């Protein structure tokens, strides 16, 4: 049963050139296939033409299966793109929510810092608002700016930072400043419309390995915002270890340096191994695409659960690492899943069935062209098809073998995909009639049959019929016996012995 698809996904399909092309190719061929299928269903196996029709039916079936697979693959790939696009939209909404909360938090952080710098207690109202907004930010998937530790000094002469001598006011250390204190929107607005400053930001993000766009001074909000998300996450890692920066640009310089050396605050930061884990939707898309390719069906619910875990475990065990802009490691999810599916007994059965059908089709083409193939050659051709070679290429090679020594006009017809059996069929049918033979018993290498087409021209049917009467097999036919009887009767009549 085809998977249920949303109206949005179906609309997306209609705008994807690969899906449209694959669907059109299949649709264009279906009528041709139906015609060949009808001819096959309506032709008895005892018919002279059945082998030719069977071969054509097998080729048509293989082609329609190939076109169906191409359509399914295109739709599976488009589904992955669509889901990634939808996920990006969700991320954009989430980013807008977290940015709004950050915009409210950052002024509160600045106010709190001002109280701390003066050694004054932070009003409960500010602390309460910060706590509430930080909770909302975490729930929305964001990360609050690292808390600023406050160290309270002792009183009197021993006050750590006593401001009034012996009586000593409550003192504090200089608070940790955060590169993330400045509101993201306020930060980025400084670059919009300023080509040189935007180039500076693009360069800083690119040097840190977070931006792959052009350094052209054009503020592409989606690309830059995506890069800044990654930057803020990594800056937060540094700051959680007490490594602070006065602003984002200075932080990006540190990220760029560590990106070049593959370092990071814990040895696994920028440039360190990163495992990208497919979510449920992405994993199911990869799994179903692999099942379609290898087994021509969707995965069952139980198989989806099983292979999600297998895929996610492999992703965790094979993280990627980016050093100097070069990413290594990770897994090829499509190939990994195909390898796992190949372990199923069903795969072995399907493979054997497909090989048998392919071998039968190859043998049909060989027979239709008077070419004898041994088992080793058949296996070799079948393996090439299994490895991805189009069976039409194999059939063309077989016709190329049949063309050896043939007149140019026959070779040209063979090159156009017309079998030798079809080319000789008028002569073969006449030969079967005159010599009273089963057409299937007439080998395409029969010298009498081959004599019908010479290097310069084809023999007229009348001349070929006369040539057949000189064939040694003609004397054993009923036709020959009737002719002899008729001649004898004429002689008797001529001499008056028969009325």
Image (spheres, rainbow, N blue to C red):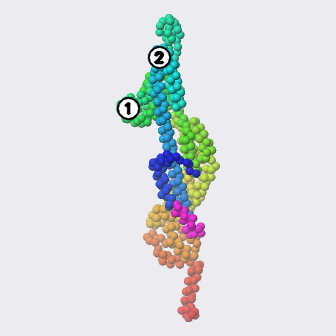
**10 Å neighbourhood of mark 2: few (<14), some, or many (≥20)?**
few
Q: Is residue 73 visible?
A: yes
Residue at horizontal 57 percent and vertical 80 percent from the top: 479
Against 247, residue 414 (above or below) is below
Image quadrant assignment for residue 194: top left
User: Which sits in the foreground, 224 or 394?
Assistant: 224
Residue at the top extreme, as displayed: 166
Tell me if mark 1 has few (under 14), some (14-19) or many (20+) residues whose alpha carbon lies within 10 angstroms of its own.
Answer: some
SS assignment at label 2: helix
> Label for residue 115?
2
On the image, the x and y values in percent for residue 495 come to: 55, 93
Residue 113 image point, x, y percent: 47, 19
Location of the C terminus (image quadrant): bottom right
Foreground of the two, 178 or 404 = 178
The residue positioned 54% from the left and 62% from the top of the image is 37
Quick check: 190 left or right of 42?
left
Which residue bears the numbered disc 1?
A: 192
Residue found at x 58% / y 72%: 438
User: Range of the magenta residues?
Assistant: 33-53
Kindly indicate whether the residue at mark 2 contacts the one at mark 1 (C-beta within 8 angstroms): no
The answer, for residue 237, to whether it is visible in the render is no
Residue at the farthest right position: 345
Q: Looking at the image, which is closer to me, 32 or 452? A: 32
Q: Nearer the viewer, mark 1 or mark 2?
A: 2
């Amino acid at each position: 049963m085809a998977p249920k698809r949303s109206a949005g996904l179906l609309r997306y399909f209609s705008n994807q050139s690969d899906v449209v092309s694959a669907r059109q190719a299949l649709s264009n061929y279906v009528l041709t296939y139906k015609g060949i299928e009808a001819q096959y269903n309506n032709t008895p196996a005892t018919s002279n033409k059945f082998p030719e029709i069977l071969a054509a039916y097998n080729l048509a079936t293989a082609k329609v299966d190939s076109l169906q697979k191409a359509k399914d693959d295109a739709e599976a790939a488009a589904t992955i793109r669509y889901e990634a696009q939808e996920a990006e939209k969700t991320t954009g909404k989430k980013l807008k929510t977290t940015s709004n909360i950050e915009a409210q938090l950052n002024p509160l952080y600045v106010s709190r810092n001002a109280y701390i710098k003066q050694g004054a207690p932070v009003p409960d109202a500010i602390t309460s608002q910060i706590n509430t907004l930080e909770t909302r930010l975490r729930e929305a998937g964001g990360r609050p700016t690292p808390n600023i530790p406050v160290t309270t000094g002792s009183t009197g002469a021993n006050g750590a930072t006593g401001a009034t001598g012996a009586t000593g006011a409550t003192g504090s250390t200089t608070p940790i400043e955060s590169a993330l204190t400045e509101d993201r929107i306020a930060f980025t607005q400084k670059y919009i419309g300023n080509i040189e400053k935007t180039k500076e930001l693009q360069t800083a993000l690119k040097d840190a390995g977070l931006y792959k766009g052009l350094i052209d001074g054009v503020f592409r909000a989606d690309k830059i915002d995506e890069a800044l998300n990654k930057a803020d996450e990594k800056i937060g890692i540094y700051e959680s270890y007490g490594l602070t920066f006065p602003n984002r640009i200075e932080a990006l310089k540190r990220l760029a340096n560590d990106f070049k050396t593959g370092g990071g605050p814990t040895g696994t930061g920028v440039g360190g191994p990163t495992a990208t884990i497919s979510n449920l939707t992405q994993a199911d898309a990869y799994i179903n695409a692999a099942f379609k390719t290898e087994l021509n069906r969707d995965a069952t619910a139980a198989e989806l659960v099983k292979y999600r875990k297998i895929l996610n475990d492999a992703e965790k065990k094979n993280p990627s690492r980016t050093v100097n802009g070069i990413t290594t490691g990770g897994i090829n999810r499509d190939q990994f899943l195909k390898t796992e599916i190949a372990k199923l007994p069903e795969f072995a059965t399907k493979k054997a069935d497909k090989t048998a059908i392919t071998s039968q089709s190859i043998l049909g083409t060989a027979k239709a062209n008077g070419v004898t193939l041994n088992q080793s050659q058949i296996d070799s051709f079948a393996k090439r098809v299994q490895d991805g070679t189009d069976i039409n290429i194999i059939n063309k090679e077989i016709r190329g073998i049949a063309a050896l020594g043939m007149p140019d006009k026959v070779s040209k017809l063979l090159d156009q995909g017309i079998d030798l059996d079809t080319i000789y069929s008028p002569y073969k049918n006449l030969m079967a009639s005159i010599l009273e033979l089963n057409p299937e018993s007439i080998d395409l290498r029969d010298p009498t049959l081959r004599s019908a087409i010479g290097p310069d021209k084809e023999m007229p049917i009348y001349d070929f019929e006369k040539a057949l009467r000189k064939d040694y097999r003609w004397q054993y036919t009923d036709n020959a016996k009737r002719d002899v009887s008729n001649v004898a009767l004429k002689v008797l009549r001529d001499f008056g012995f028969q009325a």
